[in-house]
Amino acid sequence: MTQESLTEKLATHLMRPVDEATRQRARLHLLDWLGCVAGARRSRVAECVISQGIETYALATASWLGNVMEMDDVHRASILHPGPVIWPCILHNDADDFDHMLDAAIIGYEAVITVGETFDDAHYGFYHNTATAGVFGATAAFWPFPDDDHDQKQTEDNLQKLVSAFGLAGTSSSGLWQMRHEDSDAKQWHIARAVKTGLDASVVAFKGIKGPRFILEGPQGLYAATCKNPKPMTFPDQWRIHEVSFKPWGACRHAHPAIDAALELKARLGALEEEILVETYADAVAFCDRPDPQTVHDAKFSIQHAVAIVATRDVPQLADFEPEAIAALADARGRVTVSEASDITSRYPEHYGARIHCAGETVELVDTRGDPERPLSKDGIVEKARALIAWGGLPEAEADRAVDLALNGKDAGAINRMLTDWLS
């Protein structure tokens, strides 16, 4: 009997029914992504993509913008952001059946997270998981899954073509972290390319082009090239979109535990006026130990700046990461020291935590606001989307439009028309 590849197991896992509760969860993630896209309308990336004609239609433009504000949804164990990759794929299909569109999104989330969870520390040390696993999620999101009326042979043929699509996408998996060390737009490029790769792989594989079955675990596959100890692939009964966190603040997720802990300690003390020590996990230190940020991007990846916002102001607002605030908070950042704590690192990536000390008091958080253990409410997600849409320069009526279409709508085309209005 021929050995079954991991992508074959994944393809079979994806071919299962989606329940209504999971569709309702997906609607919240759709709204969250729409808010992130709207918030980035006035960014330099948007200006380049739109005014320079890099993309010629709204959904392709949107694939560049979902991550710009650093408020996109995040899955902890796989250390990636599913939403910016998956939603442009789904809406590209312009499905007449809104439930079918939501199902495709849920399947896309499942694929990107399932693959991303198998990558180890060695992979994440050099590779941007949202990009490297993203091509698998995009492929699944674009894929035309058969309905219940198809016979067994058609279903099996569809499955094998999907495996080929995964193989083709996997051969193009890429995205290096060098962009963290420079002022560049490579992170947005990674996501746009993952979307395009998933589309291309799906189209050609469906027409008969074959890809390698063992693209993950083969002797010269993705694991051999980028991992030292890949983790086992698992297939839980619950759809993994339920494990995805919502980000309440416009900073790198690795800075959020420190923000959350600082807010709790400030509430306890009334003020954070003395020296502040932040302990957190190793990746948070590697990504976000930036005592002297110079750009908006730097500020969003600076624990020192994020905690200084809390100490000097309060709950971080989008404007608090802009140049004026970067200059104003220099002295407050100087009071913040960041270090790694091995016990917090040992719980990562299943838990993103931090411990903060000031004035003889300590607050420690195992999980962060927006995680499934400490979820944002539906109202909180709506409020976040409204704030982002306003930040993007759109009137309140557009926020009403987005909330209604995402949470109550039945017309994917109406969402595409809204995006066209926003991004033209």
Image (cartoon, rainbow, N blue to C red):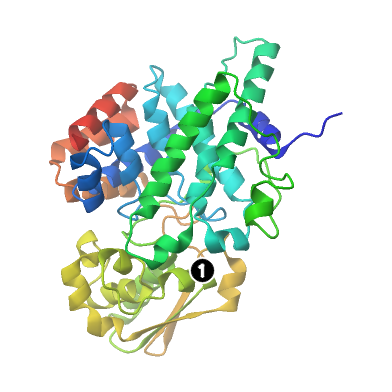
Residue that sits furthest to the right in the current view: 1
- Disc 1 marks a residue whose amino acid type is Asp
Q: Is residue 77 left or right of residue 267?
A: right
Position of residue 378 measured from the top left corner of the image (x, y, whole percent): 36, 44
Q: Is residue 160 in sight in this rendering?
A: yes
Task: Say which quarter of the image contains residue 419.
Answer: top left
Classify 10 Å Cα crowding around label 1: few (below 14), some (14-19), many (20 and above): some
Q: Residue at x 40, y 23 (%)?
A: 93
Task: Say which quarter of the image contains residue 195.
Answer: top left
Task: Say which quarter of the image contains residue 160.
Answer: top right
Q: Is residue 84 in sight in this rendering?
A: no
Q: Residue at x 41, y 75 (%)?
A: 289
Position of residue 287 measured from the top left corner of the image (x, y, whole percent): 44, 68
- Figure quadrant of the C terminus: top left
- Figure quadrant of the N terminus: top right
Q: Nearer the viewer, residue 177 or 152?
A: 177
Q: Nearer the viewer, residue 78 or 49?
A: 49
Q: Which residue is mark 1?
A: 283
Relative to residue 182, is residue 159 depicted above or below? above
Q: How many marks?
A: 1
Q: Is residue 105 left or right of residue 166?
A: left
Q: Is residue 295 left or right of residue 85?
A: left
For the residue labelled by badge 1, is the local secondary structure a helix, a strand or a loop?
helix
Q: Residue at x 37, y 27 (%)?
A: 92
Position of residue 406 measured from the top left corner of the image (x, y, whole percent): 32, 33
Q: Residue at x 25, y 70 (%)?
A: 314
Relative to residue 26, is residue 319 depicted above or below? below
